[in-house]
Amino acid sequence: MTHDRSKKRQRKSTDDRRLEIIDVALGIIARQGARNFTAKNIASEIGITPGAIFRHFATMNDIVEAAIDRVEVILFEDVASDDPDSLKRLEMFFHNRIEVILRNRDIACMLLSDHLQQAASEQQAGRVEQFKVRSRAHVQECLEGARDEGALGATEPEAAAVLVQGAILALANASTGSSDTKKLEKLSTKVWSLLEQTLRGGRPL
């Protein structure tokens, strides 16, 4: 009897269990692909029965929806900035996105694949695509602002956006093959320094 009460005390709250299911589902989709996104695999990784999952989510599709919501929060919760310097806003976005990638390696895998879209319905896949659109639009907006402020060199904002986004994806790719967070943080700082110098047209920072 004492043992049973102890187990009950250790049982996770509904919200904590839901979040655990979502995060485990994201990890499976990101690292193993949509084919392995099953209740059995989620349950096995958590240490519960497959039936227990459906006490928190009505369907697997509901888990995908919740996972997409989770990705959106992780990617965009700290993006907004009212700094009047457009390149400073872009720098904050760059470092925020790299921090997100280093804290959430599964997100890095998501950015480099279409695994989440494959597990999603057509409408849900459209939501995921909009995350990319929003990111591109933010980068473009910052670069156009920098051009208008006279801070951008000869590079056109559209071309400069490709450099910035390409650097983020390259660092995301590097993060999936390395667990040395400090090294990747230092690398991202150097990458931004080179990017900023290029964006400013080689002018001293």
Image (cartoon, rainbow, N blue to C red):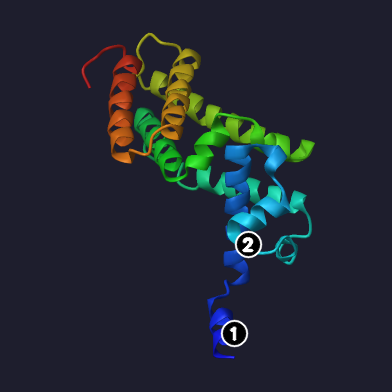
Residue at 41% from the left image edge and 10% from the top image edge: 155
State yes or no: discs 1 and 2 in contact (Cβ < 8 Å). no
Pick the front one: 87 or 3 = 3
Q: Is residue 108 visible in this depiction of the protein?
A: yes
Quarter holding the N terminus?
Answer: bottom right
Residue 164 quadrant? top left
Q: Is mark 2 on a helix, strand or loop?
A: helix
The percent position of residue 116, horizontal first and vertical second, equals 66, 38
Pick the front one: 169 or 1 = 1
Residue at 73% from the left image edge and 40% from the top image edge: 120
- Depth-wise, is mark 1 or mark 2 nearer the camera? 1
- In this rendering, the answer to whether 99 lies above or below 170 is below
Q: Is residue 81 visible in this depiction of the protein?
A: no
Quarter holding the C terminus?
Answer: top left
The percent position of residue 22, horizontal first and vertical second, equals 62, 54
Q: Is mark 1 on a helix, strand or loop?
A: helix
Residue beneath disc 2: 18
* Horizontal side, residue 202 vs residue 59: left or right: left
The percent position of residue 4, horizontal first and vertical second, equals 59, 84
Residue at 48% from the left image edge and 18% from the top image edge: 162
- Identified by mark 2, the residue type is Arg
Residue beneath disc 1: 4
As measured in the structure, the alpha-carbon distance from the residue carrying label 1 to the one carrying label 2 is: 23 Å
- Identified by mark 1, the residue type is Asp
